[in-house]
Image (cartoon, helix red, strand yellow):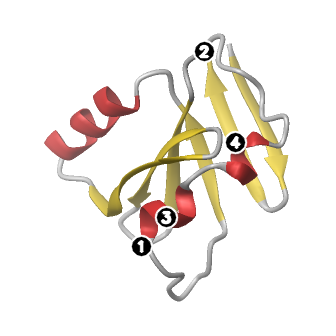
């Protein structure tokens, strides 16, 4: 199942049985994952995954660019992916219970 919802300027999409937003993405670690805001600000959409490490590995193998490293805080782990135009896409994995 794929779900998309908006949380204060942030669209979040999840697939499968991942938890819903419940306000958690705003408490995520995307800010620490990417350092200081650059032109374009922090507006982005989020892709929620159950395996952030596997997703990052596949994207790196395909030549994707990232801003910062994977961080862990708040509700889970995050890494910021840059699209070819430099727009940010937040990859997010909720903490496992």
Task: Point out which mark residue 32 bears.
Answer: 3
Please, what secondary structure does the residue beneath circle 4 have? strand
State which mark lies toward you, 3 or 1. Answer: 3
Crowd class of label 3 (few under 14; some 14 to 19; many from 20; radius 10 Å): some
Q: Which residue is mark 1?
A: 86
Tags 4 and 2 touching, CB below 8 Å: no
Q: CA distance from mark 3 to mark 2?
A: 22 Å
Tags 4 and 3 touching, CB below 8 Å: no
Which quadrant of the figure has residue 82? Answer: bottom left
Please, what secondary structure does the residue beneath circle 1 have? loop
Q: Position of residue 48 (x, y in %)?
A: 58, 33
Location of the C terminus (image quadrant): top right
Location of the N terminus (image quadrant): top right
State which mark lies toward you, 4 or 3. Answer: 3
Q: CA distance from mark 3 to mark 1?
A: 18 Å
Q: Which residue is mark 2?
A: 97
Which residue: 30% across, 39% down? 56
Q: CA distance from mark 1 to mark 4?
A: 19 Å
Q: Position of residue 4 (x, y in %)?
A: 75, 35
Q: Earlier in the sequence, mark 1 or mark 2?
A: 1
Which quadrant of the figure has residue 25? Answer: top right
Task: Point out which mark residue 16 bears.
Answer: none
Q: Position of residue 87 (x, y in %)?
A: 49, 69
Which residue: 49% across, 21% down? 50
Q: CA distance from mark 1 to mark 2?
A: 34 Å
State which mark lies toward you, 4 or 2. Answer: 2
**Position of 32 relative to 27 (above/below):** below
Q: Which residue is mark 4?
A: 12
Crowd class of label 2 (few under 14; some 14 to 19; many from 20; radius 10 Å): few
Crowd class of label 4 (few under 14; some 14 to 19; many from 20; radius 10 Å): many
Q: Earlier in the sequence, mark 3 or mark 1?
A: 3
**Position of 59 relative to 35 (above/below):** above
């Amino acid at each position: 199942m794929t779900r998309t919802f908006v949380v204060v300027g942030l669209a979040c999409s999840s697939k499968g049985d991942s938890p819903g937003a419940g306000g958690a993405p705003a408490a995520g670690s995307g800010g620490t994952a990417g350092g200081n805001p650059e032109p374009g600000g922090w507006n982005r959409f989020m892709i929620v995954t159950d395996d952030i490490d596997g997703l990052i590995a596949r994207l790196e193998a395909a030549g994707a660019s990232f801003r910062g490293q994977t961080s862990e805080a708040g509700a889970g782990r995050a890494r910021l992916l840059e699209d070819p135009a430099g727009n940010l896409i937040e990859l997010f994995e909720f903490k496992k219970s």
